[in-house]
Image: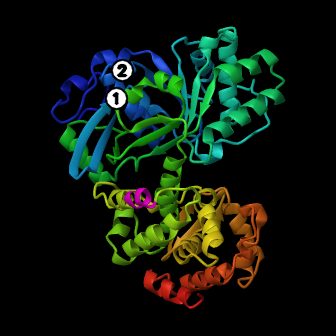
Amino acid sequence: MKLLSRFTLKNIDPQLVTIPQSSLLELPEKVLQFGTGVLLRGLPDYFIDKANRQGIFNGRVAVVKSTSTGGADDFEKQDCLYTLCIRGIEKGENVTENIISSAISRVLSADKDWHLILEIAHNPQLQLVVSNTTEVGIQLVKENIHQHPPASFPGKLLAVLYERFKAFLGSESSGLIIIATELIPDNGKKLESIVLELAHLNNLEDAFIDWLEKYNTFCNSLVDRIVPGKPDAETLEALENSLGYTDKLLSIAEPYRLWAIEGDEKVASVLSFGQADEGVIVKPDIEIYRELKVRLLNGTHTLTAAMAFLAGKATVKEAMADADMLDFIQQLMFNEIIPAIPYKVPVEIANNFASAVIDRFSNPSLEHLWLNITFQYTMKMKIRVLPLILNHYKLFNKVPEYMALGFAAYLVFLRPVKKEGNQYFGSCKGEDYLIVDDQAAYYFDKIHNTTAETYIVSVLADTSLWSIDLTQLPEFTTYISEVYAAYNECNDQGTLKKLRSRAAKTV
């Protein structure tokens, strides 16, 4: 079979897959996107591609690859075309849809193509910047933005904006809309504050800072779609055989989709691709969407990931097929998370969202690996879960049993048994697994420099890690210690019932 490219489109059966018209491959670049990940390709780029096919937005996406890992060869070989296979249930109906997306025009490396990225700032048709650099990407790095390239994402963004200011002499019409999709509270506004601080640190002229503040709009946003990415080899082979071509960038996504963007009517008018799909929501306040998604979907993922992985469940759908795991997830969401959401959400809306999450997790077409969900686990636990635990104590002043079980499992998972170079590995049932977490070194040092009796207390009391002393929460330390000990005794059986039974003795 031939590789997907603009030259092989004519050989693909349009009854099997939606094929872009050749004119769509010539649309101008209107979006600069920082990040090549499957979520961006499966959600923002999906909306843009859909709008282009309807003749609405009529613009493509220039993508910046910021990390040094991997390459852009697959994008080049496929002329930036990729297949999105949508599988699942929507409104009670089975959904099977294959789309060849032509949203992306090119992928540039920040390390190798920085001059080309700065050239994009000179494009008068550029309207929008989108980012997903992971939650750790939006951080202040005090650096010279005239480097080629700056090290941090905010530094790169500031350099592009400064280049645009110079190219268009600070005109009002040259301002851009910048939408952050990283999963942190007030992501757009936090990015804006860092960019402004960095501009002052670089002693950029007052006229630029005035242009930056007046004519550029930083938007908070929330993205919600499960896009596990490239399927396993067997599923990929079956899909490629059915489609009649090979695709190194093929991804599977669920039908559910939401991109909630905080903005006014002016923002909505620029983001015209929102007219093509009801999944794009532009409103002045999107907090309810963020809380529902971050707590019930992401929070549940975070609290379940280690438990499921350590119990031998590789994927989300495997866990959903296990009666004990399913019961844990349901009890967690309906009995603990919903009452503790730190935002006024009507119970009926929260219950409906939780029920939809159960259906989404059970999607038989998605191979969503728990191990992938553990990436940057500590950061996710702090942002998604810790506010729930603290609010639960504020409301009920007792241990949230299911949250605590998930938290204890996280501590077991983040227990490095060995270090190779800069990589850290845990072990489960005799097999090593890679820990991808900025705090892996912290846990490695901690576990080798404390006794077994003091380890849990030392971690929970560390305010530099949690910004709060968790040992001050009534019975929390005792509960976590009991579950942690239970894992040491019965992890090889992977029995959730034993863990819950052991922990229940403490409450």
Residue at figure coordinates x 32%, y 52% from the top left: 233
Q: Is residue 61 magenta?
A: no
Q: Quadrant of residue 352?
A: bottom left
Seen from the viewer's position, the closer of residues 396 and 33 is 396
Q: Is residue 142 left or right of residue 475?
A: right
The kind of residue tagged 1 is: Ala
Residue at figure coordinates x 62%, y 66% from the top left: 391
Query: What span is in magenta?
Result: 347-352
Q: Where does residue 33 sit, x and y in percent of width and height?
A: 53, 30
| Circle on res. 276 | 1
Mark 2 and mark 1 in contact (Cβ < 8 Å)?
Answer: yes
For disc 2, the marked residue is 56
Can residue 448 be seen from the camera position used here? Answer: no
Residue at figure coordinates x 59%, y 56% from the top left: 376
Q: Where does residue 27 sit, x and y in percent of width and height?
A: 39, 16
Tell me the quadrant of the picture where the C terminus can be found: bottom right
Element on which disc 1 rests: helix
Q: Where does residue 50 sit, x and y in percent of width and height?
A: 33, 29
